[in-house]
C-alpha cells in the first residue's frame, strides 16, 4: 500500500489541500492506521507549537532602551527629488511663456480703443511685444510646414516619455513628499 | 484612546516626538525577544541584540519607505542582527556553534529531553531549542508572530519554497519524536 506523503499531511494541517486531494486523503485514512497515526501526531505537534512559550524581556527594558535613544539626536531629512523639481519648474516656465505670448497676441490684435492706460504702460507693452516678436521671428521657420510636423512629433514624444517617467517615479516621490 | 497603527507612531517619531518610539518598543519587544531567544538560546545575549536591533531601527526610520509592513522590516533587522551575532560568536568559538548549519538531527538529545519533560507540551517546547537556529526562528515567526510564509521569506531572505520545506521538516521531525515517545498514545 502506498502511504500518504509528509507533504500532503502538512498541507492538510495548513488547510492547503484542494477538495479532490482532501477526499482522496479521507478515503485513504479509513483503511490506513499508520497514516492516521502520523496525521494525528502531526496535529498534536501543530497544536503544541500554537501554544509555544513566549519569552519576556526584563521589566525595565523599555526604560533603559529609551535612555539610550534619548542620547541619539534624530533628524529626519527627506531626500530631495531634483527630477521632480525640474519637471515642475519646466512646466511652470512653459506655462508662463505661453500665457505671456497669448496675452501679447490678444493685446496686439485688439482694437486700439481710446484707453486710460498710462503712457509708461504702453511703452513697456510695446517694448516687450517688439522683443518677443524678435525672439520668435528667429524661430518662425520652425512653425511652418514640414518643420512644424517634426517639431510637434518630437515634442509629443518628449511629453509622453516625461509623463511615463513621472508616473514611474510617482511612488518614490509620494514617499519623499511626506 | 484608540490603538495607533505602526505607521502613525513612526510618523509621529519622525515629526520629533521621540518618546513615541517607546510604543513601538512595547509592541514588539517580547515578540522580538522570543525570536532572538530561540536563535541565540541565551537571555543576556538576546536582550543585548534586541536593544541593538531597536537602536538600528530607530536610526534607520528615514529609510523605512512603508512599502512593506513595519513588523516585517523590523524582524528583518532582528533576524540579520542575530545572524551577525551568531557568526561572530562562531568565529570566536568554532566548536560551540555547529548548529548554525542546517543539519537537522534531533536524535542526540531527544532522550534526555524526554526524561526531563512531564508532558508533550514541555517536550515540544524544549525540542524547539534543539532545532537548528534557522528552523526554530521560522517556527517562531510562523506560530508566535503569525507571519505568513511570504513575510517569513522576505524577513529571512530565503525563498518561499525553502521556508515551506524548513517548516514542514521541523514539524515532521517533531512528529516522529512524538510517535517515538508514545505521546500520541497518551493523548488518545
Image (cartoon, coloured by chain):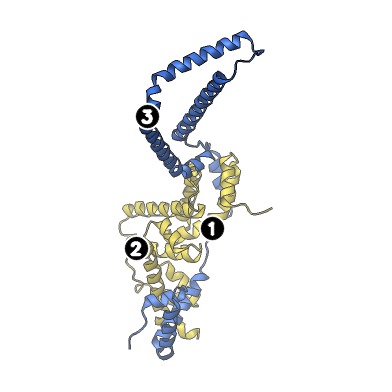
Chain colours: A blue, B yellow
Instruction: Judge whether A75 appears above or below B26 on screen.
Output: above
Q: Which residue is mark 2?
A: B99
The structure residue drawn at horizontal position 56% and vertical position 51%, both measured from the top left corner, is: B6
Q: Which residue is mark 1?
A: B30
Evaluate whether residue B182 shows in this view.
no
Chain under numbered label 1: B
Look at the numbered disc 1 and give the secondary structure of its residue: helix
Q: Mark 3 and mark 1, same subunit?
A: no
Where is residue B98? Give x, y as percent. 32, 61
Between A124 and A31, which is closer to the camera in this rendering?
A: A124
Structural distance between the alpha carbons of marks 2 and 1: 24 Å
Q: Is residue A59 left or right of residue A140?
A: right
Packing grade of label 3 (10 A; few <14, some 14-19, many >=20) is few
Q: Nearer the viewer, mark 3 or mark 1?
A: 3
Evaluate whether residue B65 shows in this view.
yes
Which of the 4 quarters of the picture holds residue B27? bottom right
Where is residue B169? Give x, y as percent. 37, 71
Q: Which residue is mark 3?
A: A145
Q: In the rendering, which numbered label is found on residue B22? A: none
Amino acid at each position: 500500500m502506498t502511504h500518504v506523503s509528509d507533504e500532503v499531511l502538512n498541507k492538510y494541517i495548513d488547510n492547503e489541500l484542494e477538495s479532490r486531494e482532501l477526499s482522496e486523503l479521507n478515503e485513504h485514512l479509513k483503511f490506513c492506521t499508520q497514516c492516521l497515526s502520523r496525521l494525528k501526531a502531526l496535529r498534536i505537534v501543530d497544536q503544541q507549537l500554537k501554544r509555544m512559550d513566549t519569552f519576556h524581556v526584563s521589566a525595565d527594558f523599555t526604560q533603559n532602551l529609551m535612555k539610550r535613544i534619548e542620547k541619539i539626536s534624530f533628524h529626519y531629512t527627506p531626500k530631495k527629488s531634483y527630477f521632480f523639481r525640474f519637471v515642475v519648474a519646466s512646466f511652470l516656465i512653459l506655462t508662463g511663456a505661453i500665457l505671456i505670448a497669448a496675452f501679447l497676441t490678444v493685446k496686439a490684435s485688439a482694437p486700439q480703443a481710446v484707453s486710460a492706460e498710462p503712457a509708461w504702460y504702453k511703452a513697456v507693452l510695446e517694448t516687450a511685444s517688439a522683443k518677443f516678436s524678435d525672439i520668435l521671428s528667429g524661430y518662425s521657420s520652425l512653425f511652418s510646414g514640414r518643420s512644424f510636423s517634426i517639431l510637434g512629433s518630437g515634442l509629443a514624444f518628449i511629453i509622453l516619455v516625461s509623463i511615463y517617467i513621472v508616473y514611474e517615479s510617482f511612488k518614490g516621490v509620494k514617499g519623499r513628499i511626506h | 484612546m484608540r490603538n495607533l497603527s505602526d505607521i502613525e507612531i513612526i510618523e509621529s517619531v519622525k515629526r520629533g516626538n521621540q518618546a513615541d518610539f517607546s510604543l513601538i518598543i512595547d509592541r514588539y519587544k517580547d515578540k522580538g525577544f522570543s525570536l532572538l531567544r530561540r536563535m541565540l538560546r541565551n537571555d543576556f545575549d538576546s536582550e543585548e541584540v534586541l536593544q541593538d536591533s531597536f537602536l538600528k531601527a530607530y536610526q534607520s526610520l528615514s529609510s523605512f519607505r512603508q512599502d512593506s509592513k513595519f513588523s516585517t522590516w523590523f524582524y528583518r533587522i532582528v533576524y540579520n542582527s542575530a545572524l551577525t551575532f551568531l557568526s561572530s560568536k562562531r568565529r570566536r568559538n568554532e566548536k560551540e556553534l555547529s548548529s548554525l548549519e542546517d543539519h537537522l538531527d534531533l536524535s542526540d538529545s531527544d532522550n534526555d529531553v524526554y526524561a526531563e519533560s512531564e508532558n508533550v507540551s514541555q517536550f515540544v517546547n524544549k525540542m524547539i531549542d534543539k532545532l537548528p537556529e534557522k528552523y526554530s526562528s521560522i517556527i517562531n515567526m510562523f506560530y508566535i508572530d503569525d507571519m505568513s510564509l511570504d513575510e517569513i521569506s522576505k524577513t529571512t531572505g530565503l525563498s518561499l519554497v525553502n521556508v515551506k520545506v524548513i517548516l514542514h521538516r521541523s514539524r515532521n521531525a517533531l512528529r516522529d519524536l512524538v510517535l517515538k515517545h508514545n505521546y500520541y498514545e497518551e493523548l488518545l
